[in-house]
Amino acid sequence: MPRISRAALTASGAWACLAFGQVASAQDTGPPVIVVTAPGGGIDMEEATSLDRADIYLAGSPDALAGLARSVPGVLLGEAQGNPWQPNLSWRGFAASPLQGQAQGLAAYLDGGRLNLPFGDTVPFDVIPDAALAGMALTDASPVYGLNALGGAVVMTTATGFSDPGTVATASYGRFDERELSAATGGTSGGLGWFGALQYRAEDGWRDYSPSELVNGYLDIGHEGERFGIHLKLVGADTDLTGNGVSPVELIAARRQSVYTHPDRSQTRYGRASLHPWLALSAASHLEGTFYYQTLRVRSVNGDSADIEACDDEDEAGLLCLEPLAEDTDEIVLTDAAGQPVADVLGGEDYGLLNRGAVRTRSGGALVQFVDEREIMGGTNRFVLGASIDGSRTRFASSAELGALTDDRSVDGLGTLIVQADGSIAPVGLVAKTRFAGVFLSDVLPVTDRLTLEPGLRWNHARITRTTRSAPRWTAAIGSAGSIPASRCAMPCRTR
């Protein structure tokens, strides 16, 4: 395959990009390279819509999702989280999204390991360094992909020294202090190969109070032989993103950059280690596997306006109440973690809430499959039989702190956690454990030179255990730093 080289300096209006190096393809010589992509051994990859490494770098800086939106009909990117680096990927009406509560209709795989996070099946595109990707594909729906694959699968493959030798580096600067630096390099020595990538992205944002910063890293060390190969891959990310919500039209008309309430920050730390061995059993068949372990920690804080005001009832003078939902309903006195009424300390000024959340997830899994590929009936038959297992433990907590709404529409915390007896506003604590196991079979069977059958089967077993933690012992769950306590449950319950 030809080697693609690029040395360019471009400028247009308010941005500039500098790139140098080589985006290289694997050479035709050398030992065979087995690439573990997803369950099914790459079923439907011939018909999949895919990008290679040159497509990812086409705009100068590495950006896989923008490459999909640019090259694939039917792909849409939406900013449901309010941040361009946390987009919703929509394809044919199905979505892969980082947003909790979004229906996840696309399964996501990274080097054969499941990327959909256990808590909500969300897909964290911001933790994947684009400079490390060798390719990305959107495949049609198939049962072998397992959960969330109703609309298909997003299959991502990282680079190795064997697949992408050479070095490439990019730098760019644009409006709103947007800057990007990335570097990737790989090579081989005999049967050993290495590849590393580092990417930094940041911007102030075109709206007020909207800075974001991402650091992503990747390292691959591997061996490829005639009958055996193995790769160790490490992925890490540290992100601090702002996702300000919508603003009233009156505020936008006065000043388009204005935000209604802030802060709206989400901080993520992510680490993933995976092992990818393969073993040739014959000239036509081999075993391949993926074993991964990952950790995720997310802290979020959102400042919001609140329907809280001084109570109108004379018997409750000097206290705070929740505004009634209807004219014929009574006010509800606001209470704190001790169940005591909350005093009005602002003297008629507006109140807000600081809603905090914290998620800690540890998860891992394994995929092992037998692949047999041989010529029959005038075509290539590819038969795959495999099994996978994925497990996780997630701790989630959220709380609401009373705050003061300032003149610039930010929320300053007043140190009082709100705990209503009816549960309308109350801390939430949850420990969730999941275990998913599956056995699958796929085949690409050529019947004639114009007809191919592609049957796929999968059996899944899912087990979910949830333990809730309730007030009052969870009221200090998050605090100002968003940490999760190790206290025991006050009122545990388990559901299956």
Image (cartoon, rainbow, N blue to C red):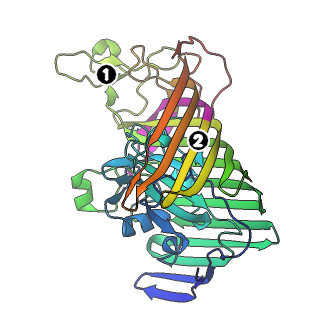
Three-letter code for the amino acid on which mark 1 is drawn:
Cys
Tell me the element at label 2. strand
* Residue drawn at the location 77% of the way across and 67% of the way down: 193
Please say whether residue 401 is one of the residues in the magenta stretch: yes
- Residue 359, quarter of the rendered image: top right
Q: Assign the N terminus to one quadrant of the image.
A: bottom right
* Label 2, residues with CA under 10 Å away: few <14, some 14-19, many ≥20: many
Instruction: Return the mark for residue 112.
Output: none
Q: Main secondary structure of the magenta part?
A: strand
Using the image as rendered, state which of residue 251 and residue 14 is in the foreground.
14
Q: Position of residue 352 (x, y in %)?
A: 39, 37
Q: In the rendered image, which residue does mark 2 sit on?
A: 385
Identify which residue, 354 or 112, lies in the foreground.
112
- Which residues, given as a range, are shown in magenta? 389-414
Label 2 and label 1: CA atoms lie apart by 67 Å
Residue 4 appears in which quarter of the rendering? bottom right
Q: Is residue 22 visible?
A: yes
**138 horizontally vs 240: left or right:** left
Q: Amino acid at mark 2?
A: Leu
Residue at numbered disc 1: 311
Which of pointers 2 and 1 lies earlier in the amino acid sequence? 1
Residue 261 visible in the picture:
no
Q: Nearer the viewer, residue 53 or 406?
A: 53
